[in-house]
Image (spheres, rainbow, N blue to C red):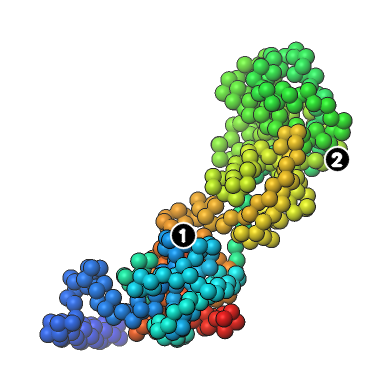
């Protein structure tokens, strides 16, 4: 009985609510039909219909936006902060050929440029009067879910979105060298070095079929290395790493795919186990070591460790590529700190940010090379490590390291950074500072902008 009465009451209440909702929608539709300034549902779904209304609503915002030029090309937007020519923008987008173009197409060279590196914020001063500054507000008008608008890169279109996350600090990402590394431990255990006498004897006096084959396949550079005379076995591990790497690459194919090619050669059970594993499950470093040790027993001896981080790949366009680092280079030290393995390289590089320069000492064959590398941005160097980045199109190179940001979902291109972020009633709440990925754009909140301006002007 109780259940039946509850069901009757629920259905009765539901029908009353449904009727009220239906009546409200009918009244709203009737009111809209009589009001010509309200778009129909079909028109509201078309961007080209809704955009003129937004643009008309935000004409005041366009009067406060300028273009930032470098060598005559637009690289960012700027936001007018004062009637007498103070302009805020993103610092890392422009170089020395900096100009400002106003809405009337007049172009100015700034007489003052002040930069806050920590927030990638630039304050410019041009010799102009009668400019239209933004109306200051603060991020309290931008709680999560609030509507916000921003100009597009051509400064004649507006884009609409919502604040998509709570305001917060964004810590700075480390710089990127742009290499993939392998430890010296791909061949060496912690306390081992290479005894070159074993390899030299086998390859110069080849008694086995595998030795004769190996000698015929080695490159001229590797054959030259075989003739080098180095006294300390610990030095062998450094100088002859390229030779060892080439030998390992030569061994892998025949031993995997052409069984019984070399008479009398028996691989260890551990090597067979690694071969039999699924490709993704193989420990490639261990397999490298096992192959060399099976074919050339006693080539590794206990002694002073002398392994280094070896470069397996140099990313195209990366800081390493621009500095001339190469595949198979051995990183001996960074900033005078020794690097015995890849973790040492990572730990040192993490202490430096994008744009900072570090000194690397490289072992390249028999030579020692010194390189000064200006570190790049991690996300643009390794975009494939984040699916969001791969799908994002253009993103800002400097995307992190801000004291405080407002995050919104307006898909603005990097050239729109420096432009204002505003509420629907044209209140200035921030400056767009970084296109982070396909779903996030960061803006410095107005309160932070005001604080920075007071320190910099």
Per the image, label 1 sits on a secondary structure element best described as loop
Per the image, label 2 sits on a secondary structure element best described as loop
Q: Position of residue 144 (x, y in %)?
A: 43, 78
Disc 2 designates what residue? Answer: 304
Kindly report which numbered mark, 1 or 2, lies closer to the viewer in this rendering.
1
Identify the residue at horizontal 64%, vertical 20% (top origin).
Answer: 217
Q: Position of residue 320 (x, y in %)?
A: 62, 47
Q: Quadrant of residue 128?
A: bottom left
Q: Position of residue 219 (x, y in %)?
A: 66, 23
Identify the residue at horizontal 71%, vertical 30% (top origin).
Answer: 244
Judge whether residue 161 can be spotted in this image. Answer: no
Q: For this rendering, which residue is in front, 353 or 288?
A: 353
Judge whether residue 50 can be spotted in this image. Answer: yes
Identify the residue at horizontal 66%, vertical 29% (top origin).
Answer: 246
Q: Quadrant of residue 142?
A: bottom left
Disc 1 designates what residue? Answer: 71
Q: Quadrant of residue 367?
A: top right
State left or right for residue 21 relative to residue 290: left
Quarter of the picture containing the C terminus is: bottom right
Residue 397 position (above or below residue 119): above
Q: Position of residue 262 (x, y in %)?
A: 66, 16
Quarter of the picture containing the N terminus is: bottom left
Checking the image for residue 296, the label placed there is none
CA neighbours of label 2 inside 10 A, class few (<14), some (14 to 19), many (20+): some
Q: For this rendering, which residue is in front, 445 or 55?
A: 55
Residue 403 position (above or below residue 399): below
CA neighbours of label 1 inside 10 A, class few (<14), some (14 to 19), many (20+): few
Q: For this rendering, which residue is in front, 390 or 109?
A: 109
């Amino acid at each position: 009985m109780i259940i039946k009465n509850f069901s009757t009451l629920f259905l009765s209440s539901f029908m009353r609510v449904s009727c009220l909702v239906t009546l409200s929608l009918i009244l709203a539709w009737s009111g809209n039909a009589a009001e010509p300034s309200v778009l129909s549902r079909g028109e509201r779904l078309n961007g080209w219909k809704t955009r003129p209304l937004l643009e008309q609503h935000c004409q005041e915002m366009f009067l406060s936006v300028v273009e930032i030029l470098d060598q005559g090309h637009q690289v960012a937007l700027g936001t007018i902060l004062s009637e007498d020519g103070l302009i805020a923008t993103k610092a890392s987008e422009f170089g020395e050929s900096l100009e400002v173009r106003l809405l009337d197409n007049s172009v100015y060279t700034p007489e003052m440029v002040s930069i806050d590196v920590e927030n990638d914020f630039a304050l410019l001063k041009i010799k102009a009067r009668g400019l239209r500054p933004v109306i200051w507000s603060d991020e309290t008008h931008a709680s999560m879910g609030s509507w916000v608008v921003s100009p597009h890169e051509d400064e004649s279109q507006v884009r609409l979105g919502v604040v998509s996350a709570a305001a917060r600090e964004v810590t700075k990402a480390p710089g990127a060298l742009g290499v993939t590394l392998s430890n010296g431990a791909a061949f060496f255990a912690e306390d081992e070095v290479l005894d070159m006498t074993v390899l030299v004897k086998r390859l110069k006096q080849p008694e086995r079929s595998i030795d004769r084959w190996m000698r015929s396949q080695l490159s001229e550079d590797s054959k030259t290395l075989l003739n080098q005379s180095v006294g300390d076995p610990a030095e062998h591990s450094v100088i002859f790493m390229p030779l060892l790497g080439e030998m390992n690459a030569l061994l892998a194919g025949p031993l995997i795919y052409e069984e019984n090619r070399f008479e009398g050669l028996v691989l260890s059970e551990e090597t067979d186990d690694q071969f039999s594993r699924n490709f993704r499950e193989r420990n490639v470093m261990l397999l490298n070591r096992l192959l060399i040790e099976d074919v050339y027993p006693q080539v590794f001896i206990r002694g002073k460790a002398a392994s280094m981080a070896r470069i397996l790949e140099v990313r195209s366009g990366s800081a390493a590529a621009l500095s001339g680092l190469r595949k198979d280079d051995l990183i001996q030290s960074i900033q005078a700190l020794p690097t015995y393995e890849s973790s040492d390289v990572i730990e040192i590089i993490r202490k430096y940010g994008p744009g900072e320069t570090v000194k690397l000492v490289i072992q390249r064959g028999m030579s020692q090379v010194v390189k000064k590398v200006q570190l790049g941005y991690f996300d643009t160097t390794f975009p494939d490590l984040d699916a969001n980045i791969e799908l994002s199109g253009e993103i800002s190179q400097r995307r992190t390291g801000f004291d405080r940001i407002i995050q919104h979902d307006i898909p603005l291109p990097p050239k729109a950074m420096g432009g204002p972020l505003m509420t629907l009633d044209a209140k200035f709440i921030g400056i767009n500072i970084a296109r982070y990925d396909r779903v996030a754009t960061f803006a410095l909140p107005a309160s932070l902008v005001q604080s920075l301006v007071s320190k910099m002007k």
